[in-house]
Image (spheres, helix red, strand yellow):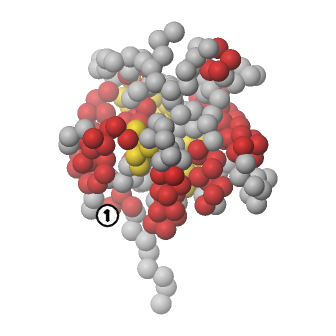
Amino acid sequence: MPPKKQRPEKSRPSVFWVLAGIVVPIGSLLARFRVVDGDKLPKTGAYVLTPNHYSEIDPVMVGMVTWRLGRLPRYLAKESLFRVPVLGWFMRKSGQVPVSRGGSTRGAAPLQEARKIVDEGRIVIVYPEGSLTRDPDMWPMRGKTGAARMALEYDLPVIPMAHWGTQQVMARYGKKISWFPRKTIDVKVGDPVDLSAFRGRPLDAATLTEATAVIMDAITALLEDLRGEKAPQSRWDPSQHDQKETGRFDG
């Protein structure tokens, strides 16, 4: 007897149906999406999806894209959001991952979730930059090592993604949504990042930093294609510009 065909993740009843019923119609009023190489986003199996990040509304827009491409968006999210009434309930029920900004649980929660992702064939969306890019022209800045650690620890593929246009819906560090006219957001999905050179190596700082740079290179290359221009040769490093790497920044 041939193996039973796996049902698309999106077709299984879940709290995502409720969330999509609320978010997708509103988001569709804000923007239309032009997706390039959407077929490169695997429809089954576990992996880490790594987009660029430059607007507070990015998670909503990226979530809509992954939903339309057949996968359920799960994020590493600030622990404080889980304490917000109603929102916290939806986040827990939809499998979002609470991550503390500090303390001993900061690195533990993502890796524990990675184990569940492998076991259940899910995906998790990780912003390697860790915060909105500080680069003046909104190119991807230096990445943090969480996505690389998760991928190498549990042998998960990393699928890079870039998008451009969400800053027209909500400016970087802005608080207001621009409703009219309807915006266009371009999205491009890349091939799995080749991390074979790092597998089997000790997961020390050097390995994780090198692997993270390869992931950031892949994201940046996709964004260059969308923007039709080249990124700066040196990736922006907030520490070299007296900038904090987390939280809002208005400079």
| Residue beneath the point at 75% across and 55% down | 202
- 64 vs 92: above or below: above
The percent coordinates of residue 233 (x first, y second) are 76, 22
The percent coordinates of residue 249 (x first, y second) are 48, 16
Could you tell me which secondary element the residue under label 1 belongs to?
loop
Comparing 123 with 242, the one in front is 242
Q: Is residue 73 visible?
A: no
- 165 vs 19: above or below: above
| Residue beneath the point at 34% across and 37% down | 80
The percent coordinates of residue 105 (x first, y second) are 48, 48
The percent coordinates of residue 172 (x first, y second) are 45, 19
Comparing 58 with 206, the one in front is 206
The residue at which mark 1 appears reads as 12
Comparing 21 with 77, the one in front is 77
| Residue beneath the point at 24% across and 48% down | 89
The part of the image, by quadrant, that contains residue 28 is: top left
Instruction: Name the amino acid type tagged 1.
Output: Arg
